Image: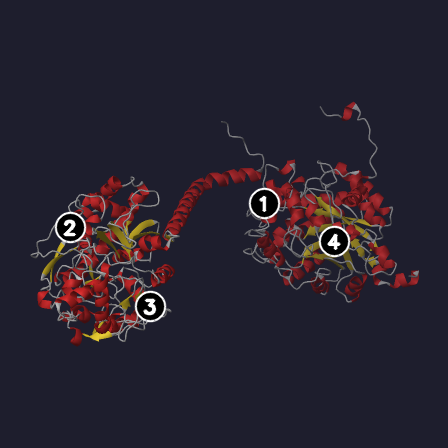
Amino acid sequence: MSQAAATADVIFTPLTFRNLALKNRILRSSVSGRFDNEDGSLTQTRINWESKFAKGGIAAIISSYVPVLMEGRIIAGYATVHRDDFIPYWEKLGEAVHSFDCKFIMQLSHSGRQMDVPGVHNYARPALSSTSKKESLHGFLCRAMTVQDIHHVIEAFAKGAWRAREAGLDGVELHAANGYLFTQFLSSGINDRTDQYGGSLNNRARLLLDVIQAIRAKVGDKFHLQVKISAIDHNNVVPWEKKGNTLADSVKVAQWCEAAGADAIHVSTGSLFPHPLNPPGDFSFETITATYDAMISSGVDTLRNYFLFRHPLLRPIFRWVWFRMKRGRPVEGVGEDEARAIKAAVKIPVLSTGGWQSATKIRDAIKSGACDGITIARSLIANPDLPRFWEAGHDLPPLPCTYCNRCLLNAPKNPMGCYEPLRFASHEAMVAQLMTIYNTHPILRVPPPSEVVP
Amino acid sequence: MIREAPVTAVQAALHRRWRALTPVYILLALVALIGVIGAVAGAVLLWQLAQNRTPYYVDVVDEFKYGSIGAETHSGIPYRIWRALPTLFPEAFGGRDDYTAFGFLYEGGPDGRWRDLPIGISRRTYRNVDVVWFNCATCHTGTVNIAMADPYGALRTGRHIVPGMPSNNLDLERFIRFLLDAGADERMSADSLIAAMNTAGPKLSRVEEFIYRWYVVPLLRDGLILRRSRLTPLLAQQPLWGPGRVDTFNPYKLIQANLPLASLQKSELIGVADFPAIFNQGPREGMHLHWDGNNTSLDERNLSAAMGAGVTPDSAEIGTIKRIADWLKTLRPPPSPYRPDPAAVTRGRELYVKQCQACHGFQDANAYTFSGETIGKVEPNSTLGVDPARLDSYTQKFRDYQVANFFGGTPYQFKKFEKTDGYANLPLDGLWLRAPYLHNGSVPTLADLLNAPAQRPVAFVRGVDTLDPARGGFVAPACTPPAAPAGAFCYDTRLPGNGNGGHVYGVTLPADQKSDLLAYLLTF
């Protein structure tokens, strides 16, 4: 394809936010792996991981889930931004990504009660949440936050944004989707508070809007700030749970975020993670049986789930629970309609996530006004240079992502990467691919005596 | 032991939950345990309730003597109680621990030891309880004691058990009366019965004792009391049956058909007749069967007889009944041991052919010939003039009930029963084993039968199996009712149903011709 034709391709037209300009419409959606140190400092492996995507031709990377406090981790081993002395590490990561002409947006996060692998810091305390009711799928325990706790968290988000800006990163995203702390406040299916942070939608959105205002107060108006929200909660994955927020609720929340100073809305789905509709696709019982043991000690209902996953006679129960929400829905562009509804209600750009992989469908979505940009995780894990295939005129790469979700189900225990056996000649080939992110190692050194703590 | 502190918040929560729910878990575990025990006990109980098996005998003669036709299920006595009754009621059993006192026959088994059960008593495991009761051989296996010097034929001098001949020893009424009375006897309480069972056989386990005390004994006593209340008023109106005799249809009306005694006519209440011989059934197909000839189908007659033994439509062992019926089609009686003068036999045969063969067929050197103009047909009793009680006991009303109700909706439904006006002309094969003669056994010997009714014995001894060397039949000395020698019975022809009149054929022949005719009849 000629340069002119490629330029004409809407995918490769620039996307300009108030404070940030992207070279094209494709962003790597937030995805992580257990690459980092127990204290939250990031490693060379993470830099290698992110560089892989940056080199592939996308316009921006939304970081891994980055906790603003150690009490907000979902899986120990993901880099955090809770300490000022981590700024140089993030700076180095930003430098690496920028070297491939790619932007880097840090996703500021707090797990709330959705804490898959708590890590030693969080062993002995229940997670913080809007409620004291345990999480519905795994039985994660939690305690309703006091107003003081909430103020502490707001402050932590503001500081996290400040550290991202100090590290020279290109913006931040508030992870207010997929069941983490913000969702736990936003969702009518979860939030049972009776104070100013519970009850009406306005009250439930207060934490998110307070955080936006606090960030703006801390970093000013010139730093990119986007908000990721779940358009529809579908909170009744466990059938007796309430359904949670509707699309109309989320449209309101998006408008309030815009008014509070957000630069973009990133539209996802579901009030827990993973969720049948996010990421959409298959569910491998053999894979989850091999990895879910890492989570058994994390919740009070996990052992039940393990039996449901492990025993062939019990699997139909979970299969029914999980797949009943997916009937009649596409995998690719599963959230397109919701993104369109939100885009119609706001003036700031809207990003859509959910199974995107083929150039045709992405072009259609953008041209038809469903969204302004697309975020992708799994399809880029399978083919980090996916944009190159589109540029070359292909709709899909030769070995596309199959949406098997084995990458997701391996997350609690194994390095992030593609685990789809159909995409590899052998198991060894798959492992070799997974190991490529470890190729560049930091230079090892002998610590000076002053650095060694007895 | 020091309790280890929980490491994680989840563990602490799980510990709290465990402590709070411990009583619930213990309760659930108990409930589950009780459930498991209940399920196992239920399964064992269902398995036991499903048990319904009976031994199969390779030899059809053993099957006839000891095999089950299905009577035990609804009419039988539990085997352990059967064994215990002689201990409990020594006065009824003559002090013996077997049932010979009622005329039941015992013989040696294949192991050379006396068999546990007499001929005519079969055994079945039903609902895991062994139950015993009647089969075909109960009424159709008798004995003959040959005392003559140098008899010919298959049987030598001595006492022989002959399958297929009438059960000339069995005093069925006395046996039934004993059981009915026992059912109301205090010795049949669970305590004394269980003690007697433990004396007469291996000690019952606690489970068996429980089952007998609360299920088997009450069920048996209820059944006996029911039968007692139905049958005793009937028996009270009948003369004693004596050995070798049965009322075929009246108990059947009261027990199997559930008809009240008050609904029966006075004229039908005495149906007592001799057990018949059942040799050579094949040639009898199509003839009028039963003494009064009320059915022409062997199959129906067989099933009806089985019901008389206690079989019900749902318990009948159709296969066994058919197997025995097939065997009986060709079962020949042992040849007569008499050696009358051959010249007299030849003369007697000429007389017989002229005067008797049309109704009865005839005997050749080795076989019986079932031919004759009226053989197997019903002769009106207005012509015959024998005692009518047996004929009157089978009524049109009962016939209609039988046809409408027994084996309805199955291939075995009764169709051929009919009410007749007389008695059937019977083939005389195995005649030497069929004394006393006429349907009610009112004439002790063949010689007596050739005499006019007034000359026939008024009262004679029944229940002796010794063959009379000259008169044809069993030794039957005269007696004065009710006195009788030990183990025998004084039969009084003057009582209702016992009449010895009628069948006056040959009675007017001169003495020498009678003697010739008797000589020929002794070869049958």
Closer to the camera in the image, B399 or A126: B399
Residue carrying label 2:
B487
Mark 2 surroundings within 10 Å by alpha-carbon count, few (fewer than 14), some (14 through 19), many (20 or more) = some
The three-letter code of the residue at mark 2 reads Gly
* Horizontal side of residue A72 vs A9, given as left or right: left
Residue carrying label 3:
B283
Residue at 56% across, 55% down? A241
The three-letter code of the residue at mark 1 reads Thr
Closer to the camera in the image, A444 or A326: A326
Disc 1, SS: helix
Residue carrying label 4:
A226
N-terminal-most mark, 4 or 1: 4
Disc 2, SS: loop
Discs 2, 3 touching: Cβ within 8 Å:
no
Residue carrying label 1:
A302
Closer to the camera in the image, B90 or B469: B469
Counting from the top left corner in percent of width and height, residue A210 is at: 66, 51
Q: Are marks 3 and 1 on the same chain?
A: no
Discs 3, 1 touching: Cβ within 8 Å:
no
Q: Are marks 4 and 2 on the same chain?
A: no
* Horizontal side of residue B499 vs A319, given as left or right: left
Closer to the camera in the image, B189 or A51: B189
Mark 1 surroundings within 10 Å by alpha-carbon count, few (fewer than 14), some (14 through 19), many (20 or more) = some
Q: Which chain letter goes with mark 4?
A: A
Q: Which chain letter goes with mark 3?
A: B
Alpha carbon of mark 4 to alpha carbon of mark 1: how far?
34 Å
Q: Nearer the viewer, mark 3 or mark 4?
A: 3
N-terminal-most mark, 2 or 3: 3
Q: Nearer the viewer, mark 2 or mark 3?
A: 3
